[in-house]
Amino acid sequence: LLWGKDDDTLYYMTMDEFHRPYRLYQRKDWKSDAPTDTLLKEELDDLFWCSSYKSLDGKYIFFDTASKETSEVWYLSTEEESSVTEMKCVAKRRNKVLYEVEHGDDSWYVWTNVDGSPNMKLMSSPATADSASNWELVEDANGTPVFDGSLAKSLDSVTVLNTHVVIEGREGGIPRVWVYSKETKKMKMLSFDEDAYDVGMLAHFEADTKSIAVSYDSLVTPPSSIEISLDDDSQRTVLKTKAVPGYDKGSYGCDRMEVLSRDGDTKIPISVVYSNETMEKVKAGERVPVHLYGYGSYGACMEADFDTTR
């Protein structure tokens, strides 16, 4: 359920007989005894799963339809919702091309694997229909693409704010958050004191903001919510921390290391958590038992997060 420009118009989706979201409707005068429902878009191919969302700046309603390998996004301007009900396509679907879209500064911010890149690249173009031919890589002040779709780092999601673009992804096997300034075209990765951790953006509902909130935890640090300034990421405020009765963080430690796989080239990241008492035994030359566990196929990683039952 989405609101339009104001509370006179709302949008909702319905499911087919297999509980697959596939139709987007617009409802006008919903508070009256005779509201008007209009079908805006539907996806009849049951390989495609659909969703709808509103741009963070409130200017567009999007209809996203995607299979495992192909996607397509349609949009409707909230400024025109009172008179226009025909959605336009950001870029026509192409086989094995995935893309997602956000809006900001009259531009589409697109993250896509177009041209067969192994990871998503970050691109932008004017906010027009059939814009694929105008997509260009977003670059930093030195003219270097901030995300070129290579194996060096992955891109998972993009949040477009008025002054910055916040990007979530992974580098070195660890979740990362990058902040890109629209004004200076500089991008910086948020850093933390611990070598192994789990971090991610919390929900944001306003594009006009001077800070963001992230969730953070590690193998030895309980989950916390942290507010971070967009202009100076050293300005941080811990909003909330999960209380763990009886837990003493000072009694434990964690490290991050890499080992070569059997092919001699691939580096496998390993996160290690231990009691300081046990580590003193190791340093003294004593052999101690280790519980080793790992999983990482299909991009489903074992994060270095906090677990009271570990």
Image (cartoon, grey):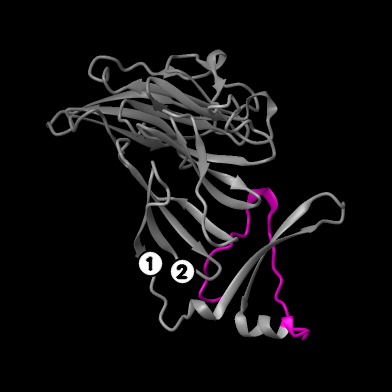
Residue under the point 15% across and 28% down: 34
How dense is the environment of label 2, judged by Cα within 10 Å: few (below 14), some, or many (20 and up)?
some
Relative to 268, 145 lies left or right = left
- Tell me residue 275's x, y (percent): 60, 80
Q: Identify residue for label 2.
A: 222
- Tell me residue 103's x, y (percent): 40, 27
- Does 70 lie within the magenta span? no
Range of the magenta residues?
282-310
- Tell me residue 299's x, y (percent): 65, 49
Relative to 194, 15 lies left or right = left
Q: Identify residue for label 1.
A: 241
**How many numbered discs sit on the rendered protein?**
2
Task: Examine the image and state in which quarter residue 184 appears.
Answer: top left
Q: Element under label 2? A: loop
Considering depth in this image, is 146 or 283 the residue closer to the camera? 283
- Does 299 lie within the magenta span? yes
How dense is the environment of label 1, judged by Cα within 10 Å: few (below 14), some, or many (20 and up)?
some
Cβ–Cβ under 8 Å for marks 2 and 1: yes
Q: Element under label 1? A: strand
Residue under the point 31% across and 25% down: 59
Dominant secondary structure of the magenta stretch? loop
Residue under the point 59% across and 59% down: 303
The type of residue carrying mark 1 is Thr
Considering depth in this image, is 152 or 81 the residue closer to the camera? 152
Task: Examine the image and state in which quarter residue 32 appears.
Answer: top left
The correct choice, above or below, for 145 with respect to 227 in the image is above
